[in-house]
């Protein structure tokens, strides 16, 4: 019989460390016990089961996407219909499929986000080329805004990863507000650059200032005002 | 159907089963486990034969879960369940495959027989009746022992009583009883969760007699005494936290205690029939001594453990189930929202659970062959640590089931029992 010297509880003979406090249990009998453990080395089947379900869903989606492409292709070749519209439908089919693929998380999260970004850019470029508009909206607006959102999401993910185990009521709102501020400044900058030819921030500054105030407030609640400052405030603000 | 009128084809879920199937997921599997340790290595072929012999006595368990448009339901199946060697984590999620899967599984490993039941089909009391019947039949086939007194086990030659699969919640439901007061937010263990699909078990075996004496000295029952020790352990854990942390956690501690209603109502059902009470202590009011906690629990149980109060819970639950606009929501929508609603309103109200299944007996002739009984709770994400106690042959098994690797609460709890001068033996599946 083996006992944990710290907890005082009896443990199974083949146990090396106490199951309660992890304290190493001295091997007093110095004998080799037969493998007598009560439970087998368990296998976790969750990942396998989960992947199986995901593959099934992805397979059905692939079939649907491919059949739409085939139908569109046949109509394009055989039936003289609105060709531009058909191109749009085919493009939508491919890009939705690509986005769903990245959303299902088969790859590493970094590559999924990058893939989604590239899909959006390529889709915009294709729409631009199919539509053939005079204004250069792709280079002026679509590409910068897509890049901005991508960088902003990356920033958000980076900060979220490092703060996720802290108080969710403080850090998730702060991070979201930071995300919105960066997005607002970027969009304001892009619009003013295109309309006026230079970066001239207006409404985004209001968003930024009020947002930063809220972040500071939330962080102060979390970290507390330092004792010295608090004493000073108490003296100055007494009523 | 025509051969015997008790062989129903279709079983609608009972009141608790409706909830359990809606909230089931790969983490909250709603599967609980019962373990029996035999004196010799299990013979799988005999166990399989015993299972085949007894399954006809339990037609309401020989079913398979199916999706209806509005609710799940159980349908009779002619398939025969198979015993398997234990290879996976305990209380693994139960997949539903058309007509092939059962709401329970029988596992064996070395000297142990495990029966895992989906909580949507029956509660611990029904599950134990099944397990006891299985054990008796196993030894009848293996050693030719025919016990005289079956105890709580079923006689497999007898006819099925329709009362065994009735939904007793509906039977004892009374209209126009006002609902009980709502639950308040309580302390939850801030431990990190294990990976999905993993589940840890930890059992402490203690002798019943010294604990019972101590409980008598305090003027309470055994369950109340263990409950008080458990409360005390959680309180001690919070008090030992660093000062900034423990100020934040100075909240209520509530423990969910299921009450077996078969003792209160004349029901013989093997399906779910229990209601949970939530005794609590409020740490914002200060530190509680053991005597104070026991007084608190005794007072709470005295006030609320009676037919009138329990009726309020039954009525609320049945009424909620019968709400017409809840019923007409399609199942997939229910499946989407019920886990969130349950997390918000169901599990918010308690820190942990403690369920006492009382004394399990086997017929006198089998006593030398059956060494111990254990019952483990179903895994849950919000209350990461739950306990079930069951006693057999003057030995009390305190069985923890947990979805976290942290052992601090059990450490405090079992050290407390050691300090009372009671020997403890620990067994776990953690490696």
Image (cartoon, rainbow, N blue to C red):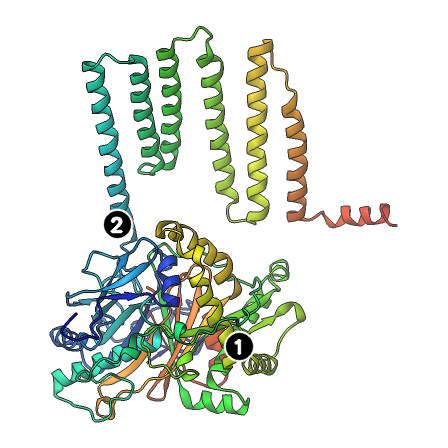
Q: Residue B3 or B386: which is nearer the viewer?
A: B3
Residue B369, image quadrant: bottom left
Q: Residue B99 or B132: which is nearer the viewer?
A: B99
Residue B50 placement (x, y as % from top left):
15, 77
Q: Mark 1 points at which residue?
A: B309
For residue B399, say whether it is visible: no
**CA distance separating discs 2 and 1:** 46 Å
Residue B22 placement (x, y as % from top left):
37, 58
> What residue occupies the far right of the structure in this picture?
A239
Residue B78 placement (x, y as % from top left):
15, 66
**Residue sitting at 24 percent across and 21 percent down?**
A72
Chain name for mark 1: B
The quadrant of the picture occupied by the N terminus of chain A is: bottom left
Mark 2 lies on a secondary structure that is helix
Q: Residue A200 or B266: which is nearer the viewer?
A: B266
Residue B351 placement (x, y as % from top left):
51, 66
Q: Mark 2 points at which residue?
A: A48
Chain name for mark 2: A
**Residue sitting at 54 percent across and 90 percent down?**
B219
> What residue occupies the far top of the structure in this picture?
A134
Q: How crowded is mark 1: few (under 14 residues within 10 Å), some or many (20 or more)?
A: some
Mark 1 lies on a secondary structure that is helix
């Amino acid at each position: 019989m083996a006992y944990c010297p710290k907890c005082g509880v009896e443990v199974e003979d083949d146990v090396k460390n106490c199951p309660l406090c992890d304290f190493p249990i001295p091997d007093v009998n110095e004998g080799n016990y037969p493998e007598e453990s009560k439970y087998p080395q368990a296998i976790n089947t969750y990942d396998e089961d989960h992947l199986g379900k995901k593959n099934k869903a992805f397979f059905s989606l692939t079939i649907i996407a491919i059949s739409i492409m085939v139908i569109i292709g046949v109509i394009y070749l055989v039936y003289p219909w609105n060709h531009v519209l058909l191109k749009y439908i085919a493009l939508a089919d491919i890009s939705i499929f690509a986005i769903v693929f990245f959303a299902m998380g088969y790859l590493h999260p970094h590559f999924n986000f990058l893939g989604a970004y590239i899909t959006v850019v390529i889709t915009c470029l294709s729409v631009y080329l199919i539509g053939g508009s005079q204004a250069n909206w792709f280079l002026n607006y679509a590409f910068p805004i897509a890049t901005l959102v991508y960088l902003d999401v990356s920033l958000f993910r980076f900060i979220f990863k490092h703060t996720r185990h802290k108080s969710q009521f403080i850090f998730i709102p702060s991070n979201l507000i930071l995300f919105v501020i960066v997005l607002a400044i970027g969009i304001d900058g892009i619009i003013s650059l295109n309309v006026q030819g230079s970066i001239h921030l207006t409404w985004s500054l209001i968003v930024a200032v009020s947002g930063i105030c809220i972040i500071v407030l939330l962080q102060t609640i979390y970290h507390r005002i330092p004792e010295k400052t608090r004493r000073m405030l108490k003296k100055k603000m007494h009523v | 159907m025509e051969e015997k009128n008790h062989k129903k084809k279709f079983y609608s879920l009972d009141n608790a089963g409706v909830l359990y199937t809606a909230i089931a997921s790969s983490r909250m599997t709603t599967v609980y486990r019962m373990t029996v340790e035999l004196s010799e290595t299990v013979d799988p072929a005999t166990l399989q034969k015993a299972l085949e012999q007894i399954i006809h006595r339990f037609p309401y368990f020989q079913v398979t879960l199916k999706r209806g448009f509005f609710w799940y339901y159980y349908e009779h199946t002619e398939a025969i369940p198979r015993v398997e060697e234990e290879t996976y984590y305990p209380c693994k999620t139960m997949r539903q495959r058309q007509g092939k899967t059962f709401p329970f599984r029988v596992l064996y490993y070395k000297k142990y027989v495990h029966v895992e039941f989906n909580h949507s089909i029956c509660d611990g009391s029904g599950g134990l009746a099944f397990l006891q019947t299985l054990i008796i039949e196993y030894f009848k086939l293996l050693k030719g022992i025919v016990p005289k007194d079956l105890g709580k086990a079923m006689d497999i030659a007898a006819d099925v009583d329709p009362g065994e699969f009735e939904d007793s919640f509906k039977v004892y439901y009374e209209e126009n009883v006002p609902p009980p007061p709502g639950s308040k937010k309580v302390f939850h263990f801030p431990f990190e969760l294990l990976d999905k699909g993993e589940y840890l078990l930890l059992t402490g075996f203690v002798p019943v007699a010294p604990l019972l004496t101590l409980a008598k000295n305090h003027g309470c029952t055994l369950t109340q005494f263990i409950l008080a020790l458990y409360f005390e352990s959680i309180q001690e854990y919070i008090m030992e936290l660093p000062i900034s942390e423990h100020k934040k956690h100075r909240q209520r501690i509530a423990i969910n205690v299921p009450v077996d209603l078969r003792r209160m109502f004349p029901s013989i059902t093997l399906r779910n029939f229990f209601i949970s009470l939530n005794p609590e202590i409020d740490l914002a009011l200060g530190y509680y001594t053991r005597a104070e906690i026991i007084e608190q629990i005794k007072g709470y149980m005295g006030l609320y453990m009676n037919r009138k109060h329990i009726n309020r819970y039954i009525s609320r639950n049945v009424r909620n189930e019968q709400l017409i606009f809840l019923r007409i929501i399609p199942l997939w929508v229910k499946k989407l929202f019920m886990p969130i609603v349950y997390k918000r309103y169901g599990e918010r109200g308690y820190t942990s659970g403690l369920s006492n299944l009382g004394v399990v007996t086997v017929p006198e002739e089998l006593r030398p062959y059956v060494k111990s009984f254990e019952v483990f709770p179903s895994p849950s994400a919000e209350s990461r640590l739950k306990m079930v106690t069951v006693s057999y042959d003057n030995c009390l098994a305190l069985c923890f089931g947990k979805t976290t690797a942290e052992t601090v609460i059990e450490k405090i709890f079992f050290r407390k029992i050691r300090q009372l001068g009671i020997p403890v033996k620990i067994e776990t599946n953690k490696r």
